[in-house]
């Protein structure tokens, strides 16, 4: 029985990046031997075990053959005669298909180290095409490693284009797609993820509204801007969707099974942005309506993220309008319901009195700004 460090840990070590998870492959062992040594089996179908002390993952060397279409339908073959090279061969990219023995020797049958040197994201073998999720993973690695000079190798891009033509993207379940998008939004160059998807044709299948001459650069610019200001997932997604109509943004977010908060921020951003552009004077009624749509009374914290997304989505010439919106928000929230209650307002009348007072205070801003 032999043990090797594999995958991301070997890659990141060679790149001089911090290693997060360490995954191991074990050759020449059976599940029973692993259990006898105190490993705990995780997952019924895969021969993957947790180390009794470190809790790191140890997988028996395996091969995978695809049977059905899409992400499902793999048959896993694992036995003591499966070699380390067999296991590495089923992996996605050469830079992810290296191993290191416990005495420090690098096992690199597919040229991963050379591809690290030449900054190439290259598929290991034709088996890449058996898993369409790898298109998204490759785009995500491009987004992560682009600042180090990495690019998708030409034959890999050609293979991804062919996979898209063959309809493979349609077999991905939304949950996996969203998981990759969500991760990609936080990579070093999130825009690169969507550029690679566009180049291989996958964007036209996954978010067709963005695969448009004008919308695409606007979306990428807004996303880069939110990335620079350190936005969370919802804000990044809202910026990405900002060139869409509110209906398109909502439908796409729902189809991608994005979480509700994410969907709502994208819908609000796409709804408010054109209204702000159209705003020519700063009438209190218009400002208050925008604030009510943003539900500032109940969602004060979300309003900040909305502003962050809008700041990146609006044309430069329109951004000063956000200062008006912020002043109006402070004025509106300065109205205290309890003061009006003390004056005897109740129920529906109280609501109206609050609104009138808010309008008055927003109007008063005009005289001071
Ligand atoms: N892998 C693969 N195809 C997939 C998923 C994973 O070939 N669809 C392989 C790759 O060799 C990868 C390893 O399994 O290196 C572990 O996968 P994962 O933990 O998802 O990725 P990492 O490479 O460790 O990257 P990250 O830093 O994002 O965790």
Image (cartoon, rainbow, N blue to C red):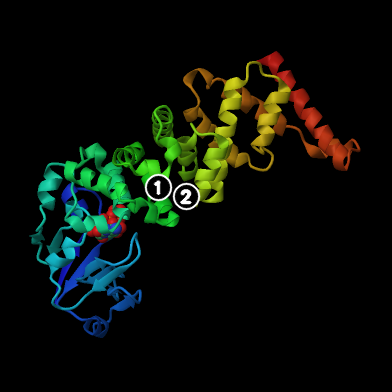
Q: Secondary structure at mark 2?
A: loop
Lateral position of residue 44 relative to residue 282, left or right: left
Q: Secondary structure at mark 1?
A: helix
Residue found 40% across the figure and 56% down from its top: 176
**In the rendered image of this protein, does residue 221 appear above or below residue 295?**
above
Q: Closer to the camera: disc 1 or disc 2?
A: 2
Residue 133 visible to an observer of this rendering: yes
**In the rendered image of this protein, does residue 351 appear above or below residue 135?**
above
Badge number at residue 256: 2
**Quadrant of picture, ligand 1:** bottom left
Crowdedness near tag 2: few (<14), some (14–19) or many (≥20) residues, C-alpha within 10 Å: many
Lateral position of residue 212 relative to residue 329, left or right: left
Badge number at residue 221: none
- CB within 8 Å, label 1 to label 2: yes
Tell me residue 277's x, y (percent). Answer: 57, 22
Tell me residue 259's x, y (percent). Answer: 52, 51
Q: Earlier in the sequence, mark 1 or mark 2?
A: 1
Q: Quadrant of residue 90?
A: bottom left
Quarter containing the C terminus: top right
Per the model, the C-alpha gap separating discs 1 and 2 is 9 Å
Badge number at residue 181: 1
Residue found 18% across the figure and 66% down from its top: 87
Quarter containing the N terminus: bottom left
């Amino acid at each position: 029985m032999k043990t090797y460090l594999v995958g991301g840990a070997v890659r990141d070590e060679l790149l001089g990046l911090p290693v997060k998870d360490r995954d191991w492959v074990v050759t020449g062992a059976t599940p029973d031997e692993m259990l006898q040594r105190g490993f705990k089996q995780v997952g019924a179908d895969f021969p993957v075990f947790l180390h009794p002390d470190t809790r790191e993952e140890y997988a028996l060397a395996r091969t995978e053959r695809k049977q059905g279409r899409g992400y499902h339908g793999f048959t896993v073959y694992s036995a003591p005669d499966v070699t380390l090279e067999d296991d590495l061969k089923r992996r996605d990219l050469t830079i992810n298909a290296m191993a290191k023995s416990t005495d420090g020797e690098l096992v690199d049958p597919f040229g991963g180290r050379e591809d690290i040197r030449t900054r190439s994201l290259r598929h290991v073998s034709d088996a890449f095409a058996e898993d369409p999720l790898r298109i998204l993973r490759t785009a995500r690695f491009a987004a992560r490693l682009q600042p180090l000079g990495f690019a998708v190798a030409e034959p890999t891009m050609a293979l991804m284009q062919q996979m898209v033509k063959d309809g493979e993207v349609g077999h991905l379940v939304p949950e996996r797609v969203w998981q990759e998008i969500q991760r990609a939004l936080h990579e070093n160059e999130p825009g690169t993820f969507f550029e690679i998807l566009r180049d291989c044709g996958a964007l036209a299948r996954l978010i067709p509204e963005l695969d448009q001459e004008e919308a695409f650069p606007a979306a990428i610019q807004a996303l880069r801007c939110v990335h620079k200001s350190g936005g969370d997932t919802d804000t990044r997604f809202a910026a990405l969707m900002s060139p869409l109509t509110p209906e398109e943004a909502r439908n796409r977010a729902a189809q991608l099974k994005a979480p509700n908060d994410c969907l709502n921020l994208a819908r609000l951003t796409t709804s408010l942005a054109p209204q702000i552009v159209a705003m020519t004077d700063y009438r209190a009624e218009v400002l208050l309506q925008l604030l009510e749509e943003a539900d500032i009374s109940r969602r004060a914290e979300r309003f900040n993220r909305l502003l962050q997304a809008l700041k990146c989505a609006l044309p430069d010439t329109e951004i000063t309008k956000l200062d008006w919106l912020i002043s109006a928000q402070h004025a509106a929230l300065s109205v205290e319901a309890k003061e009006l209650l003390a004056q005897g307002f109740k129920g529906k009348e109280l609501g109206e009195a609050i609104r009138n007072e808010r309008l008055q205070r927003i109007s008063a801003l005009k005289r001071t700004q």
